[in-house]
Image (cartoon, rainbow, N blue to C red):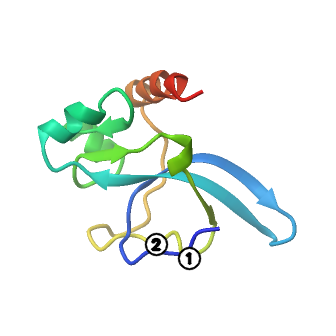
């Protein structure tokens, strides 16, 4: 199991399971990281889910272009609790929502690469 980090990062929920021993949900996430330049975006475009268009960034509650690493080895299991799920300083609340249809399609296409 993971421990909370120092910095709030966006996450993409990949799987949710109930742990009866803990009495809590275990949530497997792909962590998001900001994209510094277009070269980085192009290097990971086919492997990761990248949200970089201004309308997508806003629709998904992000504040900068973000890359989610979709590889299985990069998935992180965390407990659903306040220590792991806090809102970042740039937001007034914890944003939870669904991917729009275009982003969901891109996620599905990339997941097929990692089966």
* Residue 51: quarter of image: top left
Residue at x 26%, y 68% (from the top left corner)? 90
On the rendered structure, is 74 left or right of 68? Answer: right
Quadrant where the N terminus sits is bottom right
Residue 13 shows up from this direction = no
Note whether residue 113 is visible: yes
The residue that appears at 50% across and 75% down in the rendered structure is 4
As helix, strand or loop, the secondary structure at mark 1 comes to: loop
Q: Is residue 16 left or right of residue 61?
A: right
**Depicted 8 relative to depicted 57: above or below:** below
Tag 2–tag 1 contact (CB < 8 Å): yes
Q: Vertical placement of 48 versus 30: above or below?
A: above
Query: Circle 1 sits on which residue?
Result: 82
The percent coordinates of residue 37 (x first, y second) are 12, 44
Where's the C terminus, which quadrant?
top right
In the rendered view, does 66 fall on the left or right side of 98? left
Q: Residues within 10 Å of mark 2 (few under 14, many from 20)?
A: some
- Spatial separation of the CA atoms under disc 2 and disc 1: 6 Å
Snapshot quadrant of residue 102: top left
Q: What secondary structure is found at the residue carrying circle 2?
A: loop
Q: Which residue is mark 2?
A: 86
With respect to residue 77, does 13 lie above or below?
Answer: above
Q: Residue at x 13, y 37 (%)?
A: 38
Q: How many marks?
A: 2
């Amino acid at each position: 199991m993971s421990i909370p980090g120092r910095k709030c990062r966006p996450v993409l929920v990949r799987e949710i399971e109930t742990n009866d021993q803990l009495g809590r949900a275990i949530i497997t996430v792909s962590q998001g990281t900001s994209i510094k330049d277009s070269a980085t975006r192009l290097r990971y475009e086919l492997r990761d889910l990248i949200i970089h268009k201004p309308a997508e960034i806003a629709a998904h509650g992000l504040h900068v272009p973000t890359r989610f690493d979709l590889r299985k080895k990069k998935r992180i299991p965390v407990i659903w609790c306040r220590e792991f799920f806090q809102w970042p300083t740039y937001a007034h609340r914890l944003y939870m929502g669904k991917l729009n249809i275009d982003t969901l399609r891109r996620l599905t296409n990339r997941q097929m690469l990692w089966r």
